[in-house]
Image (cartoon, rainbow, N blue to C red):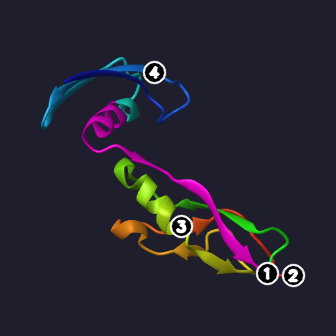
Amino acid sequence: MKKEMVCISCPMGCHLTVEGEGDNWTVTGNNCKNGERYGIQEMTDPRRILPTTVVIKGAMISRLPVKTAQEIPKGKLFDAMDELSKVVVEAPVKVGDVVLKDVCGTGIDVIATKTMPAV
């Protein structure tokens, strides 16, 4: 299998060509080791950070920005959004507070990205 992609692991945006199968992958076009890791990961187990918002009660605004603490499998993004659509948190909340533990059984938490005091 062969795929061309733009690396997003650093600001350089290298144009990668990734070829291979199973455990045997070759990455060309990368200017650093991050590009090699990114290309192989993208072909074998693509993952993403999920930024979104959840409902918050008792704050100045009604939505709290959150994100996954680490990348989750790309195939679980919509399941995670569905799970997060049911979450309601109570103010006050601080940046880094865990809003949802173990989203979709991934072992990865969802954390607040904004401090919201109670009103």
Label 4 residue SS:
loop
Q: In this rendering, would 114 be left or right of 67?
A: right
Give how far apart the Cα atoms at labels 4 and 2 are: 47 Å
* Image quadrant assignment for residue 112: bottom right
Task: Mark yes or no: residue 107 visible.
Answer: no
The answer to whether the residues at label 1 and label 2 have Cβ atoms under 8 Å apart is yes
Tell me the magenta residue range: 36-57
Give how far apart the Cα atoms at labels 1 and 3 are: 18 Å
Q: Residue 118 at x, y = what percent? A: 81, 81
Give me the residue at 24% from left, 40% from top: 44
Q: Can you say whether 34 is above or below 14 in the image?
A: below
Give how far apart the Cα atoms at labels 1 and 2 are: 6 Å
Give how far apart the Cα atoms at labels 3 and 2 are: 23 Å
For label 3, the crowd category at 10 Å Cα-Cα, with few meaning under 14, some 14 to 19 and many 20 or more, is many
For label 1, the crowd category at 10 Å Cα-Cα, with few meaning under 14, some 14 to 19 and many 20 or more, is some
Instruction: Mark 3 or mark 4: name the one nearer the start of the chain.
Output: 4
The answer to whether the residues at label 1 and label 4 have Cβ atoms under 8 Å apart is no
Residue pointed to by mark 4:
14
Quadrant of the rendering where the C terminus is positioned: bottom right
Q: Residue 54 at x, y = what percent? A: 64, 67
Instruction: Mark 3 or mark 2: name the one nearer the start of the chain.
Output: 3
Q: In this rendering, would 19 be left or right of 17?
A: left
Q: Which one is in front in this view, the residue at disc 4 or the one at disc 2? A: 2
Q: Which one is in front in this view, the residue at disc 3 or the one at disc 2? A: 3
Residue pointed to by mark 1:
58
Q: Residue 26 at x, y = what percent? A: 21, 24
Residue pointed to by mark 3:
84
